[in-house]
Amino acid sequence: MAKPIAQYFKRIFDDYQVLVMVNPSDFTGIELIVHPDGTIEKTEMEFDEEIFEDLEEDEFKPCGALEFQLTLAKG
């Protein structure tokens, strides 16, 4: 069975940005908050089945895996 591909989202606020990775098979993931000083806060997350609707409502946009992984590597 093929491993599900994670989906990535990003939203830029006034002075920080949030990147989110969601594993669609079990609704787990990681949230990264990039603060203005460059520090990165990483949080392991457990989402519900409505996460994709929630992200859209909160104006998150799809982003690439590379951008997420590079940000994660900096943290």
Image (spheres, grey):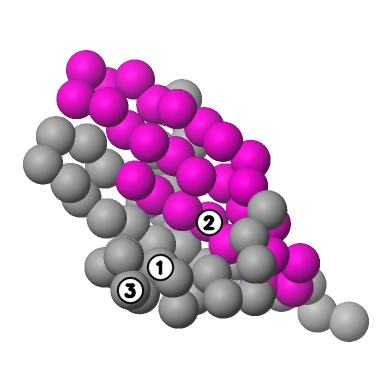
Residue stretch in magenta = 18-45
Task: Name the residue beneath numbered marker 1.
Answer: 55
How crowded is the residue under tag 2: few (<14 C-alpha within 10 Å), some, or many (20+)?
many
Q: Say if residue 68 shows up in the picture.
A: yes
Percent x, y of residue 70: 42, 40
Q: Residue 57: give its label.
A: 3
Q: Residue furthest right?
A: 1
Q: Is residue 42 left or right of residue 74?
A: right
**Predominant SS along the magenta part:** strand
Query: What residue is at 58 percent from the left and 62 percent from the top?
Result: 22
What element does badge 3 sit on? helix
CA distance separating discs 2 and 1: 11 Å
Percent x, y of residue 62: 35, 70
Percent x, y of residue 47: 63, 60
**Picture quadrant of residue 37:** top left
Is label 2 or label 1 in front? 1
Answer whether labels 3 and 1 touch (C-beta < 8 Å). Answer: yes
Identify which amino acid the numbered label 2 is placed on: Met
Q: Residue furthest left?
A: 14
What element does badge 2 sit on? strand
Q: Residue 21: give its label.
A: 2
How crowded is the residue under tag 1: few (<14 C-alpha within 10 Å), some, or many (20+)?
some
Q: Earlier in the sequence, mark 2 or mark 1?
A: 2
Residue 24: in magenta span: yes
Percent x, y of residue 14: 10, 41
CA distance separating discs 3 and 1: 5 Å
> Which sits in the foreground, 25 or 75?
25
